[in-house]
Image (spheres, rainbow, N blue to C red):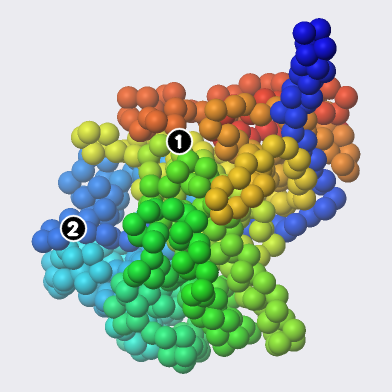
Amino acid sequence: MKKMLFTIVLLLPFVVMAQKAVIRVDTERVIGEIDPNIYGVFMEPIGRNHSTSNIVVGPLYNHASPLANKDGWNTYVIDAMKELKITNMRWPGGNYMSSYDWRDGIGPQEQRPVRKDLAWGGFDTNVVGTDEWIALNRAIGIENVIAVNLGLGDINGARFWVEYCNLPVGTYYSDLRAKYGNREPFNVKYWCIGNELDGYDWIDGYKNAEDYCKIGLEALKAMKKVDNTIKTVVCGASFYYVPPHSRFLKTNSWYDYTHDVAGHRDWIEWNDKIIKAFTGFADYLSVHRYWGENIPLEYYEYVGDAQIDFEEKINVPRAQIEAMKAYLPGKTPLMISVDEWAARGQNMRALMANAMCLNSFIRNADIVKMANLTMMTSLLSNDRLGNFYKSPWFQMFKLFSTNCLGVSIDTYVQGETFDTQTNKGIPYLDVTSVYNKERGSVLVNVVNRHADKAITADISNVATSFAGKAQVSSIEGDLSETFTHEKEESYVPKVKQIDIKNGIVTYSFPAHSITQIEIKLR
């Protein structure tokens, strides 16, 4: 009996030590400059069957609302986006884009045609068109990212839209812009050359890779002949394919999903062809990925396997772009724009996933230079009366968008891991670090994926030492609860100061939490 007790006593310190993680940042090992454009949003007027209302017309755009500005836009939303320091908005789609004619949305609103929305099934009154979108983004103070229609649309439609937006008066479409109230050019900088045109299951005007390269390249050339200062985004893969016979459709198992899809990699072939055709012509390759695809995965599949999948959709085109440097030496390589992304859901699980998406962009700051969260309105939730409030999405995004500016730096993490059926050795702590030189501080972003346990970590800086106190901002919540308006005040991050001892910050990250620690440098 004495011998057994002695063994247990010896093991206890080991168990405690095993719980402690190590995080080492290095301000001298820079991954890349963080482009503020990763803090962009996406908006699309998604409607309902047999309805002329949608997520834009009514909730956001409504001249009758007491919250409307002179242009009809909701001032609560405008002020909230300013608070988040949003940098750009991609519009008007999305799947909607492939059957949209921008010319339906200019001129007197009462004269604009009503069209059937082929993508979402509602009726589009076109009361929100180019001039209205521009007015919204001017009110917020952000850049426009316009997606042109290369589904059912054509090259002329694309180039004339650039003419309408960017040329001084003196041409047919720029004169129309002036006639409708905007004499000065809008100077729209960013243009998407179509949207998800590989999506043959859902996109009107689907193209195979060869056809998209032909029409996309010619459209890009024509648009740049109108205004050679524009930056362009070409369609990377968005259709990652689930075979109709898939076990995954019956089991919702990530293991079944990955193993059924493993033999079908058309999305990689699509990217190869697009990168080869557009390198030296376009500026960005788009990546679209929705976390977990709204599938009711088991918790650790959701926070582990889905995160690996999300990062794969960045890492694979990164490798393809790198390879193209050897194939096309001297050509300016494409950067990546993750211009549709989100983990849907109003709960802590989805919030952690969205924080890990932002961590992915920071971790890949050298190549991910733009990103657009679906939708802008996801950052604000609605109460029972339809009024917006600042949800945990808003609070989490604000931690990143207002603080994580500067450079992404190398971060070493050692700690406990977990396994799923598909992947082994997944770290519980998902970590990125940012050196904000203007503030003279390092920001460490940590998502603790452990469902039940807090994880304590020692944080140190390889290049120099920390000084003073560290400020901790944390978001915690019950995994089983849905976010509600009644708890809005409780969603504000908890902020506290902690001591730095011998140049090391020691902190216990709560289970299933999001934490940001700002540490001043000596």
The residue sitting at the left extreme is 50
- Residues under labels 1 and 2: Cα distance? 28 Å
Residue under the point 26% across and 62% down: 128
| Residue type for callout 2 | Arg
Residue at horizontal 40%, vertical 78%?
A: 197
Relative to 461, does residue 107 appear above or below in the rendering? below
x 41%, y 73%: residue: 196
The N terminus: image quadrant: top right
Q: Residues within 10 Å of mark 1 (few under 14, many from 20)?
A: many
Q: Secondary structure at mark 2?
A: loop
Residue 506 visible at all? no
Pick the residue in front: 22 or 149.
22
Residue 164: which quarter of the image?
A: bottom left
> In this image, 212 relative to 411: left or right?
left
Residue 396 at x, y percent in the picture: 51, 38
Q: Residue drawn at (59%, 68%), measured in percent from left and top?
A: 336
Q: Pick the residue in front: 11 or 334.
A: 11
Residue under label 2: 48
Sooner in the amino-acid sequence: mark 1 or mark 2: 2
**What residue sits right under mark 1 in the picture?**
348
User: Label 1 is placed on what type of residue?
Assistant: Met
Above or below, comparing residue 444 to residue 219 in the picture = above
- Residue 58, percent from left and from top: 21, 50
